[in-house]
Amino acid sequence: VTLFSDNIEEDKKYNVEEIVEVKSSQNPIRRFSKDYWKAIFKREFLKRTDAFDALYYMPIIEQCDTNTVLLSIGGDNYCYGENEYIYMVNRYARKRGAKTILWGCSVEPKAISDKMKMDLEKYDRIVARESLSYNALKKINQKTVLYPDPAFTLKAEKAVWPSGLGNRPYIGINLSPLVCKSEKIDGITMQNYECLIERILEETNYDLAFIPHVVKKDSNDREILKDLYTRYQKTGRVYLVEDQSCTQLKEIISKCHIFIGARTHATIAAYSTCVPTLVLGYSIKARGIAKDLFGTEEHYVLPVQALEKKEDLMKSYLWIEKNRESIKKHLGTIMPEYIQRAKQAAKILTEEEI
C-alpha cells in the first residue's frame, strides 16, 4: 500500500509511514524540461487544458495500471466546491486501467454540480460514510455502498496527558477555525463557547480539557483553543492538550465525561468509545452520522449556522448532560456492531468485479 500525500512531512510527523509507504503526490514542474515542453504541446495543440495538472500529479498517475486500486480517501474532498485535480487524477487513473474508489466520503447533495456528477459516475465504487450522503450518491452511481467511517475502528494508544488532567471528571472541548467560518453572526461561536465554559466552571466540579484535533497552517484548532485556555487558565481547572496522533488523542477523548466537538473525527473518537457527544456541526457529515447512530440529529448536532444567542450551545449541552446515562448506554449497545460494520468495508477491495 502506498499513500500519496499532499503534505508528506505532516504525515511523517504522525508516523503514518510505519503503516504504509508515504510518497509525495506532487512533482515540481521544472521549466523548460522535456516534460514541460510536452505539456505545452498538449495544452496548445491538443487542447488538453489539464496537461500541467497531470504533470504535477504524475507521481500518482504513473503508478496506475490494470493491477491498481486507487482510493480517494479524503472524506471531505467533494464538500467544498469543484475539486478539479481530483477529477483529473480519477480520469487519468482510469485511462491507465486502474480501478478507482471514493472511500469514506460525505457529499452535500446541493453542492453536486454537473461536472462533479460526471466524475462521481465514473468511480468503480463509492463508499459513503453516512446515510444522507449515501441516499444522494446512490442515485448518481449505483455502485455506491454504505459503511461507517473507518475512524470508528481506530484503537486508542497511550497519550501525552497534561499534568493533573484526569484527577477529576472532565468535559472535552474541541473547536476549529473552520466551523467558525460557517457562523452567520460574527463572533457568535466563541461567545457560545465562553458562555458554556463559564457555566461549567461556576456550577459544576468538572474540569475542562481543550483538545485540538487538526493543527496545520490556516486551520489550527490549537490556536483558537489556546485563546480559551489562556482566558480561563487562572481557574486551575482547564487543560490544553498538546498535539499528538489521532490514536493518542482518542485515549484522552475516550475518558471524557461528555465531549463537545467541531471536528468530525474528534467526535467519532468520542462516539466510538461511548462518550456522550454534542457536535457543533456545519455540514451533512455531522448530521448524517448522528442520524445513523441515534435515528435523529436533533439534540445531538447543533448547526453552527443556527447559533443566534450566546446560550444556544449551553442549552444543547444541558440536554446531553441530562440524558448522559441513556446516551452512553445506547452507544454501548450499538457500537460493537457499528465498528464491526466499518471493518467489513475492507472486503470491497477483494471483490472481483471491482
Image (spheres, rainbow, N blue to C red):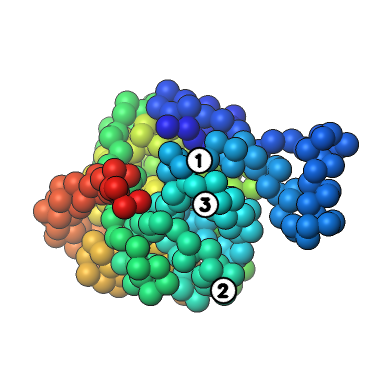
Q: Secondary structure at mark 2?
A: loop
In the picture of the structure, the residue carrying the numbered disc 3 is: 94
Asked if residue 237 lies left or right of residue 58, the reply is left
Foreground disc of the pair 2, 3: 3
Q: Amino acid at mark 2?
A: Ser
The quadrant in which the N terminus is found is top left
Task: Please tell me which of labels 2 and 3 falls first in the chain.
Answer: 3
Marks 1 and 3 close (CB-CB < 8 Å): no
Residue 202 position, x and y percent, is: 37, 54
- The residue that disc 1 covers is 65
For residue 186, say whether it is visible. Answer: yes
- Secondary element at image label 1: loop
Q: Report crowding for label 1: few under 14, some 14 to 19, many 20 or more residues within 10 A (C-alpha).
A: some
Mark 2 residue crowding within 10 angstroms, few (<14) / some (14–19) / many (20+): few
Name the amino acid, label 3: Arg
**Residue for badge 2:** 113
Instruction: Give me the residue at 81% from left, 40% from top.
Output: 36
Position in image of residue 109 (x %, y %): 46, 73
Q: Residue at x 57, y 63 (%)?
A: 80
Q: CA distance from mark 1 to mark 3?
A: 8 Å
**Is 222 above or below relative to 332?**
above
Location of residue 103 in the rendering, given as x and y in whole percent from the top left corner: 40, 52
The picture quadrant where one finds residue 147 is bottom left
Query: Image quadrant of residue 82?
Result: bottom right
Residue at figure coordinates x 22%, y 65% from the top left: 294
